[in-house]
Amino acid sequence: MFTVIVTIQVVPECVQDFISITRYNASNSRLEAGVVRFDFFQELDRPESFRLVEIYREQADQAAHQQTEHYLKWREAATPMMAAERTRVFLRNLDPTDAEWL
């Protein structure tokens, strides 16, 4: 498995529009063959702060995701709403093992 945790800070007046476009991206991303999970979170104490937790079968599946129509639409719409550049952390799972995920 290949996991990406994305942290995004949004301009406060754009929060609802960001939620809408990101829900669109997340729901379509979960239909991709290489996507195991694609979760979207909002901080309770800072409603302009969001996380995406993306789990792919392989690292190449994440690269393929970034070429999809829904991701490109999301990136174009969401980027101007961001208060700062998004950050990403790339992870490999240790437990459960990849075989236990399947």
Image (tube, helix red, strand yellow):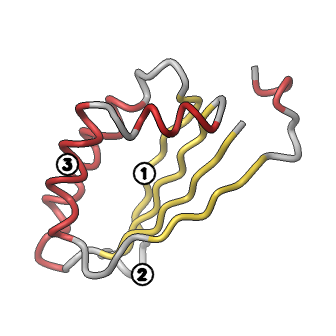
Instruction: Say which residue appears at 41% left-offset and 21% top-offset.
Output: 31
Mark 2 / mark 3, whichever is N-terminal: 3
- For the residue marked with disc 2, what is the amino acid? Asp
Instruction: Say which residue appears at 47% left-offset and 71% top-offset.
Output: 87
Q: Residues within 10 Å of mark 2 (few under 14, many from 20)?
A: few
Q: Which mark is residue 45?
A: 2
- For the residue marked with disc 3, what is the amino acid? Ile
Left-right relation of 62 to 31: right
Left-right relation of 31 to 89: left
Left-right relation of 36 to 46: right
The alpha-carbon separation of the residues under discs 2 and 3 comes to: 22 Å
Element type at marker 3?
Answer: helix
Instruction: Say which residue appears at 54% left-offset and 31% top-offset.
Output: 61
Return the x and y of residue 34 as percentages of the image width and height. 55, 24
* Quarter occupied by the C terminus: top right
Q: Which mark is residue 40?
A: 1
Element type at marker 2?
Answer: loop
Q: Residues within 10 Å of mark 3 (few under 14, many from 20)?
A: some
Which of label 1 and label 2 is nearer to you? 1
Query: Marks 3 and 1: in contact by CB < 8 Å?
Result: no
* Quarter occupied by the N terminus: top right
Q: Nearer the viewer, residue 79 or 14?
A: 79
- For the residue marked with disc 1, what is the amino acid? Phe
The alpha-carbon separation of the residues under discs 1 and 3 comes to: 11 Å
Q: Quadrant of residue 57?
A: top right
Eyeballing the image, is 49 above or below 76? below
Residue behind mark 3: 21
Return the x and y of residue 14 as percentages of the image width and height. 14, 70
Mark 1 / mark 2, whichever is N-terminal: 1
